[in-house]
Image (cartoon, helix red, strand yellow):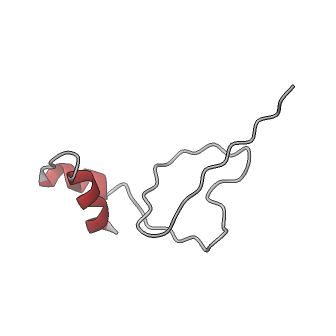
């Protein structure tokens, strides 16, 4: 994952090795099965995510008055 993340970031901005080490230390790999939820309704997201493979979908339900 680290190389894929680094390549993506460096396609936007060059990084010094020290900067990359700070970023890399804060990302941890997780795996989700197809259809598994990253967050459930009502949960607050406290993390940044980077999808190396697959697809993530975002849904927002609003209740109309």
Task: Estimate the x, y position of residue 30 in percent, counting from the top left.
Answer: 50, 68
Could you tell me which quadrant the N terminus lies in? Answer: bottom left
Task: Estimate the x, y position of residue 19 in percent, counting from the top left.
Answer: 19, 49
Residue at 42 percent of width and 58 percent of height: 50
- Toward the bottom, the furthest residue is 33
- Toward the right, the furthest residue is 65
Could you tell me which quadrant the C terminus lies in? Answer: top right
Q: Is residue 4 left or right of residue 18?
A: right
Q: Is residue 30 left or right of residue 43?
A: left
- Toward the top, the furthest residue is 65
Residue at 57 percent of width and 70 percent of height: 32
Foreground of the two, 3 or 21: 3
Foreground of the two, 43 or 56: 56
Residue at 26 percent of width and 67 percent of height: 3
Foreground of the two, 40 or 11: 11
Task: Estimate the x, y position of residue 55 in percent, counting from the top left.
Answer: 52, 64
Examine the image and state in which quarter residue 13 appears: top left
Residue at 36 percent of width and 54 percent of height: 26
Foreground of the two, 24 or 38: 38
Task: Estimate the x, y position of residue 22 in percent, counting from the top left.
Answer: 26, 51
Q: How many marks?
A: 0
């Amino acid at each position: 994952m680290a190389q894929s993340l680094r390549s993506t970031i460096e396609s936007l901005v060059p990084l010094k090795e020290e900067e990359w080490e700070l970023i890399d230390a804060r990302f941890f790999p997780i795996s989700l099965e197809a259809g598994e939820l990253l967050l459930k309704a009502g949960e607050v997201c406290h993390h940044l995510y980077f999808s190396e493979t697959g697809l993530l979908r975002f849904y927002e339900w609003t209740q109309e008055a």
